[in-house]
Amino acid sequence: MGNTLFDKVWDSHVVTQIEGGPSVVYIDRHLIHEVTSPQAFAGIGHRGIQVFRPENTVATPDHNVPTLNQHLPIQDQLSAMQVKTLAQNTEKYGITHYGLGHPYQGVVHVVGPELGLTQPGMTIVCGDSHTSTHGAFGSVAFGIGTSEVEMVLASQCIMQPKPKKMRITVDGELQKGVQAKDIILYIISKISTSGGTGYFVEFAGSAIRNLTMEGRMTVCNMSIEMGARGGHIAPDDVTFEYIKGREFAPKGKDWEKKLAYWKTLKSDDDAVFDLELKYEASDIEPMITYGTNPGMGIGITGSIPRVESVDESTKATYLKSLKYMGFEAGTPMVGKEVNYVFVGSCTNGRIEDLRAFTQFVKGKKKAENVVAWIVPGSRQVEKQAKEEGLDKLLEEAGFELRQPGCSACLAMNDDKVPEGLYSVSTTNRNFEGRQGPGSRTMLASPITAAAAAVTGKVTDPRDLMY
C-alpha cells in the first residue's frame, strides 16, 4: 500500500513516536504575530531558556495593526502594547521581525508564501488557525495554541496526534463567475463545519489543479472551517513556478536539489485515505453565507433553507442564526441589503484578489450606501497593486486602497462593522460579532463582494459580467 502526501511529509518529520500517544514532530518553519506570542515568550523567559533555533522563526504584526496612517503611533493602547512587545521579544531572542513600515510586513499567511519562506514538504506552524493556508504548497501546516508556540520556540518540535486522512476531489470546469472561494464555501456547505474533524485533507482533481497558487491558498485557508486539522494540495509546476526566484526560495544547485525532492511529494496511486469525497465543479455557482458559521452557505441564486429542510441536530443553531442575521427562512439572498464590503485577509488579500475586484468595479461606481474597505494582505501586495495602477482604478470607482493588516476579518483593530449592519466579506468566518459586536457577515468571493459594492445589495456577479 502506497503513502499519501500527508504520510510522506508527516512521517519524515517524526522525531519520536510516543507509544500509545502523540508524535513528536520537528517543525521547519515557525511563524508568529503579536497576539499569540507574548505569553509564549514570557514562558521561556520564566524558565530561563533561549529560543532553540531562532533562524526558523519569522515574525510580523498583523491582527492589531491599523490600516490607515501606519506611520503614526497606534492609538489603541492594547494593540500598541502587543505590537511593541513583539518587536522587543524578537530583538531579545534574535528572531527575524518585519515590523510596521518594513517592506515585508503584512498578514503572516500572505507574507510566508510571497517571500518563499513557505515551501513544499515543510512542516509549518503558527499560533493562528488559518496556518492551513500554507498547505497549498504541499506542506503540512496547521495552527497551534500559545502553549504550543512556547514548545516550538523552546525545542523546534511539537507533540501532535497523527490525524486521519481525507481526500476531496473536485473535477471539471468552473462556471463563469466562480472563484476558489466559491469552491471551498460549496464544500463546507455540503459537509458542514464539523465534517472534517479529525482529518487532514488533501484537495485534488482537475478543478483544483487548474487554480492559481492564490486560489489554492484560499481553498486550504478555509479547510480549518470544516473542522479539519489542515488541508494541502500536491505541488506541481504551478507551485514551482510561483516559488522560483522569491527572496528566500532555494537558489542554484540547492534549487535543483529541492525541486527533485518536491516532485516526489504526491500521493501514491495505491495510497488509501480514511475518507474520500468527490464533487463536480460545474455544480458550483457563486456562493454566499446566510448564517453564523461558514457551513451555512448557498448558491447566490438560491433561497435560505426552510426550517423543515434543516436537520434536527442543527435546527436550534439555524433558528438562532436567522434571528441574529435578521433573515427569514425561504427568502432569496439576492437583493438583501449590504452596508459594508470588505476585501482582504489571509483568505483573499493577495494581488490576484485585488485584481479581480478592481477589474469588476472598473468603469462602475461604489454604491452610496456602502462603506468599502479594500485591504492588501502585505506591503508587497500594496506595492504591486500601486505599480499596476489598481489604486487609481479603485479611486475612479469610489474606493480606497488601505494599508496591510488583518483589518475587518476580526474585531481586533479599528476596522469594525457596526452593530446590526450587514457586511459582504471575503474573509473566512461569519461568527456572531466576528467583524464587530452585533455585526452581520455574509462570506463571499472577491467578485461577489465587488457586485455588492457597486449595487448596494447582494447581487449575482454574473449579471454584471460582460
Image (cartoon, grey):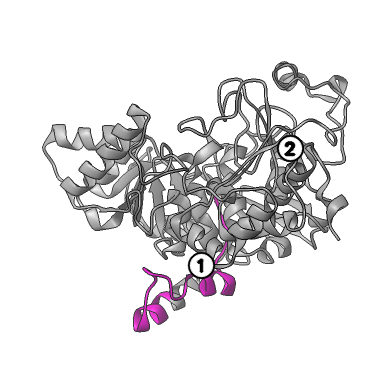
Q: Residue at x 82, y 58 (%)?
A: 176
Name the amino acid, label 1.
Answer: Leu
Q: Position of residue 53 (x, y in %)?
A: 22, 54
- Frontmost residue, 412 versus 254: 412
Q: Residues within 10 Å of mark 2 (few under 14, many from 20)?
A: few
Region rendered in magenta: 231-258
User: Which percent across, then down, holds residue 184?
Assistant: 68, 47
Q: Which mark is residue 72?
A: none
For this rendering, which residue is in front, 445 or 51? 445
Q: Position of residue 110 (x, y in %)?
A: 48, 54
Q: Amino acid at mark 2?
A: Glu
**Of the numbered discs in the image, which one, if any, rests on residue 265?**
1
Farthest left residue in view = 48
Q: Which residue carries the number 2 mark?
A: 368
* Labels in figure, total: 2
On-image quarter of the C terminus:
bottom right
Q: Is residue 272 visible?
A: no
